[in-house]
Image (tube, rainbow, N blue to C red):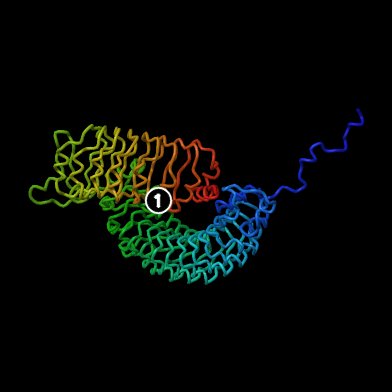
């Protein structure tokens, strides 16, 4: 038997190839020729293989072997590569051969070790998205300014100390993220980015902002948090589309005077503001959210009542000792945060009961002027023992009947409201099983309705006749669906549906493009449609916490307007809890990196 022994031979040698394993599987390249998309994220690459750069240049291997092709394998009909994802690798440089991929519209290089970029990048004239975050870049090549079709440029978390003045030539740019770098100044040319809608320069070393930013007429969001700013140029009020301005963690001593006509949210916490002046307050004509936490404010002026559109006021951790009773006259104020202030004359337990109780207490301190004739009586008792506060109805335009545990709203209440143009209705914390039909009497004026903490099992289509609604609170009910007629509520900005019985994202909400905030936590939602969600271009807050999401679709990362995404308490495995804990930006970036080609 010894003559048959082949101990020195490999019995499978005839089936083995001497070629080393390719860093990019050939099948992946073959698929990319058909689809025009190649995802090489997270493959541990230290360099981009030549086979990638030359994907549309070299003849495919099978063509050189003279094999036959079916109708689906005609390599000569290949698609030029337009999307190349190289994120989360170990790349230290990018070759000048990138010019061999002139059809690229998306190039994702985030989360690598790049310290420089090739000048050939400027030859990618079709490029629309360039993602460079989480690298080690100290500068940008001036050639980047030649990318005339670029829409999105994200360079956060690098080592940039300056930017080329030519950056202002990116005339079609809509999003620019320069956060978490070492910038001390911004180029004045940024004012020429006429299409820019979102500019993020937070976590840098900026001591001032260029006046040219006032030329950015399309910018809706400007984030300058965590810098060294001591003042903000008043010219920013010329930013006609500006809705959200973040100035947290700077060195500001005064509230900036910014009569920007569209400014709804101003975040200016963690500064050194010790006084609120009338001129600055009166300039905030459209403000909805004002965050002043962690400053040194001692008093609130009576002029705070000028902020008639204010819904949320955060004064946490200041030096406020007394509150003006007139604060209760703010018609739209829903949230007032005062923790960490040395308040006198207000019991601590009153603060813990929430905004409604605090405002009720302050209203009780207002001395009303006696009225003439029949209107002299400010409250009357109905057979149902409901107190109708005529002052609230006439002056504040509020109709309130909450915490009565009632299963219906007395007709006398609606009769008293009459023709007074009620703007806010609060029927929360009762036993209502249906929406009061007489609400439609306020169809021309009602903008805010609170029906939370009731027993509603369905939402009557009658609510869809209230075309002025901007806010609906339906939390803590028994709802499982919303009527399709709600698509008529074209002014609706926020809806609260926490603690209900929804098993899916309400279909009609996908059609309400005006929505800015959707709170759907603590339901049983099993899925969302990111393709439809991305069309809600104003959506900045989405709460899907404590639901039944088994997976989070990567395409959700394309919802670029989101500033707050809550996903905790769901049974999905990815993204991992550690990523979710890092916050919205980290989750969205992770999801974008996992979008399949």
Farthest residue, direction right: 2
Give residue 112's position: percent from left, percent from top.
Answer: 62, 55
Residue sitting nearer the eye, 527 or 265: 527
Farthest residue, direction left: 373
Give residue 122's position: percent from left, percent from top.
Answer: 57, 67
**The N terminus appears in which quarter of the rendering?**
top right
Q: Is residue 288 visible?
A: yes
For label 1, the SS is: loop
Question: Which residue, given by chain and number where applicable, does mark 1 sit on?
Answer: 535
Give residue 595's position: percent from left, percent from top.
Answer: 53, 48
Give residue 129's position: percent from left, percent from top.
Answer: 51, 59
Residue sitting at 8 percent across and 47 percent down?
A: 374
Residue sitting at 44 percent across and 39 percent down?
A: 527
Residue sitting at 77 percent across and 42 percent down?
A: 16
Residue sitting nearer the eye, 320 or 45: 45
Residue sitting nearer the eye, 51 or 542: 51
Picture quadrant of residue 275: bottom left
Residue sitting nearer the eye, 538 or 362: 538
């Amino acid at each position: 038997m010894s003559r048959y022994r082949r101990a020195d031979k490999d019995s499978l040698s005839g089936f083995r190839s001497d070629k080393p394993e390719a860093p990019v599987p050939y099948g992946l390249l073959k698929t990319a020729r058909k689809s025009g998309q190649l995802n090489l994220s997270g493959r541990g690459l230290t360099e981009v293989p030549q086979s990638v750069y030359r994907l549309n240049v070299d003849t495919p291997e099978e063509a050189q072997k003279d094999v036959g092709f079916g109708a689906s394998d005609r390599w000569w009909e290949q698609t030029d590569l337009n999307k190349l994802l190289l994120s989360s690798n170990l790349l230290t440089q990018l070759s000048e051969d990138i010019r061999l991929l002139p059809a690229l519209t998306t190039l994702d290089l985030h989360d690598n070790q790049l310290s420089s970029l090739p000048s050939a990048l400027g030859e990618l004239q079709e490029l629309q998205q360039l993602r460079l975050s989480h690298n080690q870049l100290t500068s940008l090549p001036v050639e980047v300014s030649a990318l005339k079709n670029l829409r999105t440029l994200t360079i956060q978390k690098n080592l940039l100390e300056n930017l080329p003045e030519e950056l202002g030539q990116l005339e079609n740019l809509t999003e620019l993220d320069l956060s978490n770098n070492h910038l001390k100044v911004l180029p004045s040319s940024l004012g020429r980015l006429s299409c820019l809608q979102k500019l993020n320069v937070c976590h840098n070393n900026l001591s001032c902002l260029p006046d040219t930013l006032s030329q950015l007429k399309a910018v809706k969001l400007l984030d300058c948090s965590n810098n060294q700013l001591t003042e903000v140029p008043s010219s920013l009020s010329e930013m006609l589309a500006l809705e959200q301005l973040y100035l947290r963690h700077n060195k500001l001593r005064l509230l900036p005077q910014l009569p920007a006509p569209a400014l709804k949210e101003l975040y200016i916490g963690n500064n050194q503001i010790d006084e609120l002046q009338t001129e600055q307050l009166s300039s905030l004509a459209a403000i909805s959210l004002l965050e002043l936490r962690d400053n040194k404010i001692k008093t609130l002026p009576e002029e705070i009542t000028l902020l008639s559109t204010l819904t949320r006021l955060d004064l946490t951790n200041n030096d406020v000792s007394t509150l003006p009773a007139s604060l209760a006259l703010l018609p739209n104020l829903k949230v007032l945060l005062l923790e960490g202030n040395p308040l006198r004359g207000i019991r601590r337990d009153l603060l813990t009961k929430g905004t409604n109780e605090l405002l009720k207490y302050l209203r009780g301190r207002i001395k009303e002027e006696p009225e003439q004739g029949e209107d002299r009586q400010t409250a009357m008792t109905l057979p149902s023992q409901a107190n109708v506060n005529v002052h609230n109805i006439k002056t504040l335009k509020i109709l309130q009947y909450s915490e009565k545990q009632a299963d219906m709203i007395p007709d006398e209440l609606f009769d008293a409201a009459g023709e007074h143009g009620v703007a806010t209705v609060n029927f929360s914390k009762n036993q209502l099983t249906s929406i009061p039909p007489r609400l439609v009497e306020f169809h021309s004026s009602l903008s805010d309705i609170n029906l939370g903490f009731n027993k509603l099992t369905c939402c009557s289509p009658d609510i869809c006749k209230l075309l002025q609604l901007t806010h609906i609170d339906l939390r803590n009910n028994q709802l499982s669906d919303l009527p399709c007629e709600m698509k008529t509520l074209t002014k609706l900005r926020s809806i609260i549906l926490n603690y209900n019985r929804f098993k899916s994202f309400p279909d009609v909400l996908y059609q309400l493009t005006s929505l800015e905030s959707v709170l759907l936590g603590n339901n049983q939602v099993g899925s969302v449609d990111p393709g439809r969600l991305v069309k809600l271009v104003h959506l900045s807050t989405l709460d899907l916490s404590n639901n039944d999401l088994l997976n989070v679709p990567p395409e959700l990362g394309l919802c670029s307007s989101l500033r707050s995404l809550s996903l905790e308490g769901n049974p999905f495995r990815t993204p991992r809890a550690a990523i979710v804990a890092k916050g919205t930006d980290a989750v969205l970036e992770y999801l974008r990196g996992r979008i399949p080609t």
